[in-house]
Image: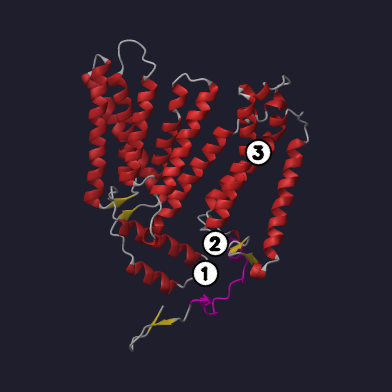
Amino acid sequence: MNLCLYAPEQEENLFIRRQARTWRRSGLIAEAQLRAIDSRTDPQVKEANLFFRILFVAFTLICYSAVIGFYFWIVEPRDHRGVALSLLFFAFAAYGLAEYLVKANHWYRHGVEEALAVTAMGLFCTGMALLLQGRGYDPSLAVKAGIFCAVSACWIYLRFGYLYAALIGYLALCSLPFHMNLPAMELRINLLLILGASLLLSFLFYARPAAEVFREKKNTLIQAVLFAGLYCAVNLRLPDMGRSFFEPSPLQPYAGFPPVLYWTSYVLTFFIPGVGLFHGLKARRRAFIIAGAMAAVVTLSTNKDYLGMKHYAWDPAILGVALVLGALAVIRWFSRGEGKARHGMTAENLLIRENHGIDLDALGAVMVPGFIDSNQPPPQSLSPFEGGESGGGGAERRY
């Protein structure tokens, strides 16, 4: 069942178009091929560029906030129940308007519906928290607000597909143990259970067939963030990282945990980055490779804290030199392979990033008199895919 407002074919066509533009900028396909791909992948939605998307988000937030402020200025609700019901009304109104704009205007990441959906999520969580608040302080109120935030953010992600909504939902879910006044060990265990279960469910339920490969990048980013959170929950010396350089007092023995749990976490700080790097290299997922590499660097940074060794001023310099030498060794290992690649991977940048600024080389060429010869014909495309033919049964076409 697809809960998203957009059909899988629409998101797949948008993904193909983005990939095709990336290939065109890198010279992998010709301009004629890009036009052919665009003609066959019409997503039937209207998408705004990043600048107008940010502009529409800011404009919508200002306008809707002004409407809410004007309402409270006129009505002036007296108690927290009236405020809560008013916020819930505006939350449902904003969400309904967001869905209407998407369905009526076929908007995709247009900015207006995005701001309305996120505003609805915030107003809903605040309104429900105020509605459930009693006369005195309720310690469980923060837990209830976190649950409402996680549920609403998850729904926004499933309905609109905003990646940051899923991350907000997981962040709210992971904040629940911190509001339960648990001991340090139980807090870590609960946090590990939440992150581990979320990561496992993500791997189980987001295994899509090849027809929906466009979802892979988004799901991989979510899984990499959960993996990084799992490592942060395992590393017991992470809060103490760098404290020895500024505080002369010794660190707390075993970080306040039982010795068995302490040394188990020490072993896991080496095991988890290795698993992340292995999975990222095997599945060719860059997000996991980056997360695993960053976790390995943090492990090396907290190794002395785990072993109770003294820090010196030159420790960061030694770590930096070791990382540079390691990166150079990996690049050299790739460059010595056949075609500067090994096992289908290379250290060479195959794709050219889009440049939104000023090309200094072109600007310098314009400034030099006589540099451009206007009588020369324009350069022809040297794409290795130019001139291909396809067809069968008498049909023939260039692509």
Task: Mark 3 or mark 1: name the one nearer the start of the chain.
Answer: 1
Q: CA distance from mark 2 to mark 3?
A: 33 Å
User: In this picture, which residue range is highlighted in magenta?
Assistant: 362-385
Cβ atoms at labels 3 and 1 below 8 Å apart? no
Mark 1 in CB contact with mark 2 (< 8 angstroms): yes
- The residue at 52%/56% (across/down) is 283
- Nearest the eye: 284 or 16: 284
Can you tell which mark lies on residue 155? none
Measure how far apart labels 1 and 2 are at the Cα level: 8 Å
Q: Which residue is mark 1?
A: 27
Tag 3: Cα neighbours inside 10 Å, few (<14), some, or many (≥20)? Answer: many
Is 363 left, or right, of 207 in this rendering? right
At mark 1, the secondary structure is: loop
What is the crowding at mark 2: few (fewer than 14 residues within 10 Å), some, or many (at least 20)? few
Quadrant of the rendered structure where residue 266 is? top right
Q: Position of residue 152 (x, y in %)?
A: 32, 35
Q: Secondary structure at mark 3?
A: helix
Residue at horizontal 58 percent and vertical 72 percent from the top: 372
Q: Which badge, 1 or 2, comes first in the chain's sequence?
A: 1
Q: Is residue 371 magenta?
A: yes
Most common SS among magenta residues: loop
- Residue at the limit of the structure toward the front, as seen here: 260
Label 3 and label 1: CA atoms lie apart by 40 Å
Q: Which residue is mark 2?
A: 352
Q: Nearer the viewer, residue 34 or 281?
A: 281
Q: Nearer the viewer, mark 2 or mark 3?
A: 3
Q: Is residue 385 above or below residue 327?
A: below
Which amino acid type is shown beneath numbered disc 2?
A: Ile
Decide which of tag 2 and tag 3 comes sooner along the chain.
Answer: 3
**Residue beneath disc 3:** 299
